[in-house]
Structure formats: structure tokens, C-alpha cells
Amino acid sequence: MTIMLFNAITSTGSAEGLAVSSLVVYDIYKTYINPQATGKRVLWLSKIVIVVFGGCMGALAVGLNAIGLNLDFVYLFMGILIGSAVVPLWNMLMWRKANGVGAVAAAWGGMLLAVTSWLATAALQYGELSLETLGRNEPMLIGNLVAIGSSGLIHFAFSVAQPQNYDFKSMREIETLDEDLDAVPQATDEGPVENLEEAKMWIVKRGFGFSAVVILVWPLLSLAAGVFSKAFFSLWVFVSLVWGFAAAAVIICLPIWESRSSLMGVAYAILGRAPKGIDNNADCMDVEARTSGSADGTCSNSGSTDRVA
């Protein structure tokens, strides 16, 4: 469980750092400050943003702990603050009629409504506003539900009134900053649109199916038990343990299995040995097929070494 928690935290932190650096560098710096920024400049600035963001998050965590806010409070309050952006973001990615101005209005409006509902529920139900009352389940639940629901309604109203009818073409025209990446052949084709549609349907079916089982089916099946008996509660705990160990096995083992070729390549490179079973000529032909060949039609040993390393 500790390893699974560690992997979840580190992967989330990594994704957050990359997301913030991309927003700052591409959406602010390169768009408004330096549109001619090179790839090296962008990479250098991205690293700086990641370090600064990580330091700020560490300082914030220490500060929140110092004033007595535990992880449970912070986690639930996070839904009140940023939960209103979930539905608008989903709509912007998946719905061609989604309105951009409506998405911004829904995110901010939903957050304001969520905070107001959170404070009002705590005040009305417990008669005071304090860290203890604000951290109770009922105010947190109302705030999170209002954040999700109100933002969805606001964005839907904007989009129906003024549909944007986005064609998603610009998402296929993402700029490549540097083309001189000779040492590492870059895959530039994500495959036919049909493949992407198939992947989308795979995700949608399993995502909605899993959500339905966890949110509806499993709780409904438990209603018949009423107040849990010792035997039923033991079964509940057993299922939770099996779920945890199965999830841990997938989280730990699947990435290792999928990256086995790269890991073996790194291991052979550290030991100074050539990987077994690799045909450099065949590797060269495969690279040339994807990159339309090199200038002289040959594949150098240094290129092969770079790919293995």
C-alpha cells in the first residue's frame, strides 16, 4: 500500500509540474512575451518553472500543516476550488459546440457558487464557521456537488445559446519548435483518425462502465445488508484488500513490462554491452521507413548507438 501511495503521489506531482510548466511557457511566455522562442529556450524555461512550482507547493504544504489543515480537508476543499473546471474542460475537448467564454464563466461562476454553498451549509447546519465545521462531510459534499453541477449547467447554457462549432483542426497543427533532432527519430503520425476514434470509444465505454459499477451498482447491492454485520463487513474489507493489491500489481508491474525493452537497453548501455537480438541493419531500415530515409541512404553506427542509449 505504501508503494502504491508513493507511486500515485509522485506520478501526480510529475503531471502537475509538467502541466504548470506547459501552461506558463506555451500559453503565456511563447504566446505573449517571446513568440520566436526556440526549443532550447522553451526547455530551459520549463525546467525553471518546474523547480519554482515544486518549491512553492512544498512551502504551501508546510504552511497548511502549520495552521492545522490535514490532508482530508485539503483534498475535499480542492474539489470546491477547482471542481468547477472539470465539466467545461471535458466539453472543450469533446464537444464541438462548447463555448470558450462560457467555459471561463462556468469555471469561475461555479467556484464562487461552490464556496458560497460550502460556507452557508456549515453556518446553517452547525451555527458557526470554523475549521472543524467547515471540514465536516455535509458542507464539503454540498460544495463539491455545487461546483460540478453548476459549472456544467452554466457552460451548457452558454454553449447552446452561442455554439462555437469548433472543428478541432488546430489541435492537429501543434507547432514543432525544433526540427534538427537527427539523433532521435521522431514519430510524427499518430495514425488514422479511425484508430483515435477506436481508442476514444474504448476509454469511454470502460470509463463510464467502471464509474457506474463503483458509484451505483456496488452501493445499491450493499443497501440490502442495512447495518453491516461483522461477516458482511469482513467481506467488504476483504474485497477492499483484494482491490488494493490488484491495483498495486497493475500500477507497479504493467509500466515495467511495457518499458522492458527500454529498461534492457539502458541496462546494456550501463554495462557497456550491445543488446542481444538487435539487428542494426533492420533497425536502420525501420527508421528509414518512418523518416523517409537519410541523406545518403545509409545508417551510421553512432545513430544506432544513440537509439539504444
Image (cartoon, rainbow, N blue to C red):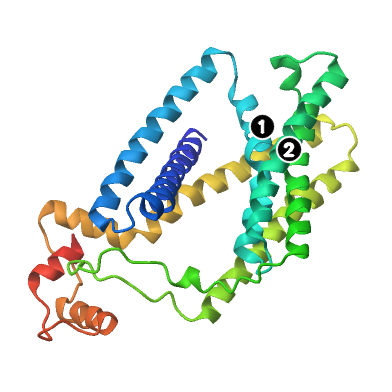
Viewer-closest of 213 and 273:
213
Q: Quick check: marks 1 and 2 in contact, CB under 8 Å?
A: yes
> What label sits on residue 144 in the rendered view?
2
User: Is residue 275 visible to us here?
Assistant: no
Q: In terms of sequence position, does the residue under pointer 1 or pointer 2 come before the other?
A: 1
Q: Residues within 10 Å of mark 2 (few under 14, many from 20)?
A: many
Q: Is residue 289 left or right of 10 when viewed as pictured? A: left
| Residue at the spot 40% in from the left edge and 52% down from the top edge | 32
Element at badge 1?
Answer: helix
Q: Nearer the viewer, residue 170 or 273?
A: 170
Q: Which residue is mark 1?
A: 76
Question: Can the viewer see residue 197 in this picture?
Answer: yes
**Residue 297 vertical placement versus 114 (above, below):** below
Looking at numbered disc 1 in the image, what kind of residue is underneath it? Leu
Quadrant in the rendering for residue 175? bottom left
**Compared to 89, does 117 lie above or below?**
above
Which quadrant is the C terminus positioned in?
bottom left
- From the viewer's perspective, tell me whether residue 292 is left or right of residue 77: left
